[in-house]
Image (cartoon, coloured by chain):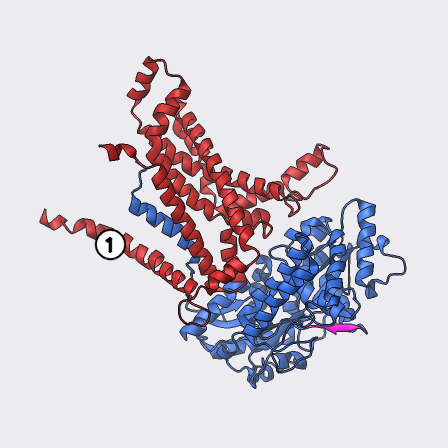
Chain colours: A red, B blue
């Protein structure tokens, strides 16, 4: 017994060191950057003032929220439906799951480029439509003139690429629900919809919570797909962070943006933890 | 099974947010590291390594970078007082901000035996008594047109002596004849349209690039530009290098950097013509671009870096560099007859442009250092707000003028040509 007491700590050490070196330290530096005026000096909110004063700040916040609030619910519904489908399949459900998760193996940017190849002026969609004679010649689809098309393209690409991460978590969660509940419900004549509503959803809450938190955080960081499909026509928070860091060479404002994204992510995480908390534990 | 506890959740959250801010840097020991913003397209980088640098005889690792990461690492190494970058290649404006971290290269020009353009060599001193960079190559922005477009030229218009009014009329005729706008501008994320405003439109309309930012002439200019934009392919907002839409036939007439037209001219030499930029009421504004080579004080092998700089200035190397990048020599050379079509086409247009009687050359921003990006943003923001979002010209110019003014104040930069160069901090009227 005595020899093994230190073992858990030793096993945790590499991960702790990694987190300290690569996440906590950079985080502290970013936080300091955000509140230190250019050229040093005492605490100041100047970078935040610059950030909010920039005309792109409003659109960036609005677009990021609109995208997240459309994409995440859409993906939740889709992932639930697909997870049900995977659970229903009797034979080789694993193969179906693998196929559905293929987009997960592709990087964000690559996913954006795939969809760009479809929607571009010289892309597949244009070639097919003009080949069929539906349109006279190549049209500009992804243009600043039709913002809703840009939004739709980004949403489509995001849904295609990232629904699978929720699906995997939900399938695992559904696998943990005891079959007996369903059998009992069937005995009492509960419809499939009712069983889903009364058994699957409540018992799936912990997995759903995890999936939603992961997905929401990632949605607030949406960047590469937007950059590929909409360029600078569609401003998002992470895109602005990148632009301030690398294009405008202003580390302070970029840090301010990073902290804002962190704050929003923490806020939504807390909200989801609260909204989907396990109430049974409280009662017991 | 997939349960994650609170601690892990926090870690995931912190991780995903912070991933984006963590920078990476890999140290290489042996070959001389050539850190550069030139020849960034993959093919050019490859040719730069295989055709230009291979001739130096010693191993050189050429890494082409975007301006942001380029400057970040140079700044970090200078600050740390030690580094792995052996030699640096960048635009005048990109190098200017690090001038105190560079060694004096006065002896390099002599050692190379080449006759370097005097005006560019003087620019390379960056206002000091030392040669902070040696000029390496030069380029500028010109116009390119598909020959199919020439039939729609306005009556009496001379391709080598166009005005912006004629360009707009030309665009209108092309749009009416073909059903879609045929003028193209590189206004995408990787495009250089801010240079169009800084070095072409503003000098052509106001005779200034900064001082008259919100003058009545500037208001007229933005009004005209809106008319030009109406004849411009809406895809322009995504274009980075105009050679691509030109070759695809999507765009017939474009303004672009010579290096970014190279492919179109080389691959389809019989389809295109190159010609000087149009003139406005105040002259034919254009912007020569100078790329220079510096050696940082933290270079692991400054002597070898200097030898490489001298090698890059040799006439033979300069000609190979021209073949590879489309950037023109900065030393006296006799061009061989077998130069690629892009050199012939661009060369003639560049010469006609700089020798025009109403030529108004304009420098890339000088003395802005790491504020260059914000300065460019001020111009592209003005464009996006006035043209794309349709905001009021006068109001936007007033606000963006304040932005430009505050950048100049922060940089304490004196004006640069064509604005009158004085020692005082440049300001917006």
- Label total for image: 1
Give the left or right position of residue B340, taking residue B152 as reference.
left
Judge whether B366 appears above or below B17 on screen.
below
The residue located at (46%, 69%) in the rendering is A38
Position of residue A281 in the picture relative to residue A112 (left or right): left
Is residue B360 within the magenta segment?
yes
Kindly identify which residue carries mark 1: A13
Give me the residue at 14% from left, 49% from top: A5
Tell me which corner region of the image, top left, top right, bottom left or bottom right, holds residue B23.
bottom left
Q: Position of residue A267 (x, y in %)?
A: 39, 47
Image height of A173 relative to A104, above or below: above
What SS does tag 1 mark?
helix
Position of the C terminus of chain A, as image quadrant, is: top left
Q: What residue sits 76% from the left and 49% below the top?
A: B181
Q: Is residue B347 visible?
A: no
Name the quadrant containing residue B287.
Answer: bottom right
Residue B304's spot in the image, x, y percent? 49, 77
């Amino acid at each position: 017994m005595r020899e093994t007491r230190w073992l858990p700590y030793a096993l945790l050490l590499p991960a702790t060191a990694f987190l300290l070196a690569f996440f906590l330290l950079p985080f502290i530096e970013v936080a300091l950057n955000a509140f230190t005026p250019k050229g040093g000096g005492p605490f100041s909110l100047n970078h935040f003032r610059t950030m909010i004063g920039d005309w792109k700040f409003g659109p960036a916040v609005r677009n990021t929220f609109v995208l997240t609030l459309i994409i995440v619910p859409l993906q939740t519904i889709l992932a639930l439906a697909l997870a049900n489908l995977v659970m229903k399949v009797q034979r080789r459900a694993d193969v179906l799951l693998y196929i559905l998760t293929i987009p997960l193996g592709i990087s964000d940017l690559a996913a954006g480029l795939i969809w760009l190849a479809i929607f571009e002026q010289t892309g597949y969609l244009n070639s097919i439509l003009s080949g069929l004679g539906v349109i006279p010649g190549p049209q500009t689809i992804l243009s600043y003139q039709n913002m809703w098309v840009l939004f739709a393209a980004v949403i489509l690409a995001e849904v295609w690429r990232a629904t699978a991460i929720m699906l995997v978590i939900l399938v695992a969660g559904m696998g943990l629900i005891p079959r007996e509940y369903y059998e009992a419900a069937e005995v009492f004549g509960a419809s499939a919809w009712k069983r889903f509503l009364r058994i699957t959803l409540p018992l799936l809450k912990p997995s759903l919570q995890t999936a939603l938190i992961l997905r929401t955080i990632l949605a607030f960081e949406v960047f590469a797909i937007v950059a590929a499909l909409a360029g600078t026509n569609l401003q998002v928070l992470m895109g602005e962070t990148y632009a301030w860091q690398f294009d405008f060479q202003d580390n302070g404002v970029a840090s301010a943006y990073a902290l804002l994204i962190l704050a929003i992510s923490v806020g939504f995480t807390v909200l989801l933890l609260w909204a989907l908390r396990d109430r049974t534990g409280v009662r017991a | 099974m997939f349960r994650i506890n609170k601690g892990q959740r926090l870690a995931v959250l912190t991780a995903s947010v912070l991933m984006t801010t963590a920078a990476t840097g890999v140290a290489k020991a042996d070959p001389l590291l050539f850190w550069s913003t030139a020849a960034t397209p993959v093919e050019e980088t490859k040719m730069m390594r295989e055709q230009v640098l291979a001739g130096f005889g010693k191993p050189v690792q050429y890494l082409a970078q975007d301006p942001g990461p380029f400057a970040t690492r140079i700044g970090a190494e200078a600050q740390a007082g030690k580094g792995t970058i052996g030699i640096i290649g960048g635009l005048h404006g990109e190098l200017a901000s690090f001038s105190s971290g560079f060694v004096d290269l006065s002896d390099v020009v002599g050692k190379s035996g080449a006759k370097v353009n005097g005006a560019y060599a003087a620019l390379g001193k960056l206002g000091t008594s030392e040669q902070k960079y040696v000029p390496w190559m030069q380029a500028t922005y010109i116009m390119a047109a598909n020959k199919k477009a020439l039939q729609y030229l306005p009556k009496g218009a001379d391709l080598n002596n166009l005005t912006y009014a004629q360009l707009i009329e030309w665009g209108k005729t092309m749009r009416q004849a073909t059903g879609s706008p045929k003028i193209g501008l590189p206004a995408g994320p990787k495009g250089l349209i801010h240079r169009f405003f800084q070095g072409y439109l503003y000098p052509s309309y106001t005779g200034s690039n900064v001082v008259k930012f919100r003058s009545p002439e500037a208001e007229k200019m933005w009004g005209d530009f809106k008319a030009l934009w109406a004849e411009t392919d809406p895809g322009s907002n995504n274009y980075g290098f105009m050679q691509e839409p030109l070759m695809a036939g999507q765009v017939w007439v474009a303004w672009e950097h010579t290096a970014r037209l190279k492919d179109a001219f080389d691959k389809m030499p019989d389809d295109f013509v190159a010609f000087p930029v149009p003139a406005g009421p105040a002259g034919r504004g254009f912007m020569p671009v100078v790329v220079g080579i510096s050696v940082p004080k933290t270079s692991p092998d400054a002597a070898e870096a200097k030898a490489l700089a001298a090698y890059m200035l040799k006439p033979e190397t300069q000609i190979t560099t021209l073949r590879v990048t489309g950037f023109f020599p900065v030393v006296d050379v006799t061009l061989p007859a077998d130069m690629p079509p892009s050199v012939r086409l661009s060369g003639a247009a560049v010469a006609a442009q700089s020798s025009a009687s109403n030529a108004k050359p304009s420098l890339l921003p000088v003395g802005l250092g790491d504020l260059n990006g914000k300065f460019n943003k001020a111009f592209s923001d003005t464009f996006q707000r006035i043209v794309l979002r349709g905001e009021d010209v006068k109001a936007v110019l007033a606000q963006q003028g304040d932005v430009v003014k505050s950048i100049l104040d922060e940089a304490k930069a004196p004006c640069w040509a064509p604005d009158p160069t004085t020692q005082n901090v440049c300001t917006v009227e």
